[in-house]
Image (tube, helix red, strand yellow):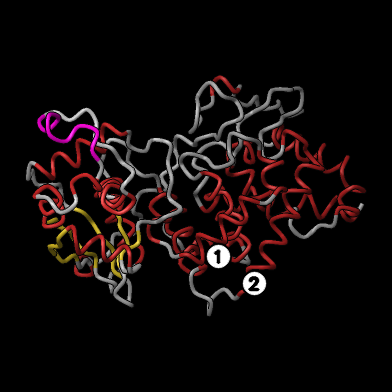
Amino acid sequence: MARRPVEPARPSDVLEEYDENEPTGVELDPEDDSATVVSPYDPRLIRVDPKVYSVRQVIDMIDDQELDLAPDFQRRRVWRVRQKSLLIESILLRIPLPAFYFSADAEGRLQVVDGVQRLSTIYEFVRDRNLPLDHLEYLGDELQGKTYNDIEGTIWSRRILNTQISANVIDPQTPVAVKFDIFRRINTGGSPLNSQEIRHCMSKDRSRQFLRDLCDTAAFRETMGSSIIDHVRMVDRELALRFTAFKLIGDIANFKRYGSMDEFLTEINQLLDNSHEVTARQLRTLADGFVRAMENARLLFGQHAFRKWPEGYGYLYPINRALFDVWSVALSDISPDRLERMKGPLVDGARSLMTNDGDFISAISTGTSSPQKIITRFDRVLDLVRECEND
């Protein structure tokens, strides 16, 4: 008896991260538990020390690059002038600020884990001096419309600079996986960071620059479309990291040694920051493969690149992370000439997998971060590529 095709969810049934009414967004896996801790760590590994700094100290530390505000970390939900002004007013009224969280590295430098918006606002007001206070609730008569230039040398500027802030500093000896979980647990604000945003706050300039450069390539921008580029939640950086991670892991079965997708991506992100682990030459090779994969995906699938595209369906589905993982890796080492010869059978085979293979459909739809689902989709696609190459 012929196997009945499995009908995939229509786009209207798919959850998306960016805009649920925008079918070119990014598909979410509602059962993906990658943010959970699979293997609880030894609580004795947690080292967090409370410290107190003055605002003057913090500003000097930012100037001296001893405190990293993650300068590339931009989100569209940045504070408006009113929110910034109310924070400055709170400081002037001597209202204590909530505690900050910093992470220390082996060289003694600090990264801001929780409190980026608050510190960025303070730094903007005091150093950039282009923030006029507005919508003040108590000090409007005295300070409405004024910048730091207008209050410098007065009791107001001294009150700001002498304000003491409390910070919990995570010791550099704390393992990366433990740090990530601490960040996740303390990340309970109104717009909590997602996993990639946390990784960005934890990382150094080397990996940030590398992932940014991948996402800035014309090949990536043209293939992925406007909804992914400069994504508000850093989904573009996560996709670039996922490609890098699955290229570096080698045998896909090695994924089994990681407790979760987050643990896997976080460890690879740390490796990218270490030139002894991933050399400059390896980065160039990865970048070349990434560009080739994007160009090949566009050549092969057109606007349906990295999206579900089952037989008989013309809908434009959201970008699918699981498909991005496997197809970006599978297409990264194929020349355009070879791909052109394989194009017809490869597209037909890919669409058949998304229509008739229940295990593959499951591997790109639910619980996609489980080792078995990852192995399944990589095995299916890589086998398909080999078959088309040999025909």
**How far is mark 1 from mark 2, CA to CA?**
20 Å
Residue at screen point 76% across, 22% down? 312
* Left or right: 65 in relation to 94: right
Dot 2 surroundings within 10 Å: few (below 14), some, or many (20 or more)? Answer: some
The percent coordinates of residue 266 (x first, y second) are 44, 60
Residue at screen point 19% across, 65% down? 48
Say which element carries label 1: helix
Asked if residue 10 shows in the view, the reply is: yes
| Closer-to-camera residue (227/149) | 149
Residue at screen point 62% across, 40% down? 359
The percent coordinates of residue 378 (x first, y second) are 66, 52
* Left or right: 336 in relation to 258: right
Say which element carries label 2: helix
| Closer-to-camera residue (3/264) | 264
Question: On the image, numbered disc 2 is attached to which residue?
Answer: 282
Q: Is residue 197 magenta?
A: no
Q: Amino acid at mark 2?
A: Gln
Asked if residue 1 shows in the view, the reply is: no
Question: On the image, numbered disc 1 is attached to which residue?
Answer: 254
Image-quadrant location for residue 282: bottom right
The percent coordinates of residue 61 (x first, y second) are 27, 66
Magenta region, residue range: 138-146
- Reading the chain from its start, which is encountered first: label 1 or label 2? 1
Q: Amino acid at mark 1?
A: Asn
How many numbered marks, from 0 up?
A: 2
Q: Residue furthest bottom?
A: 276
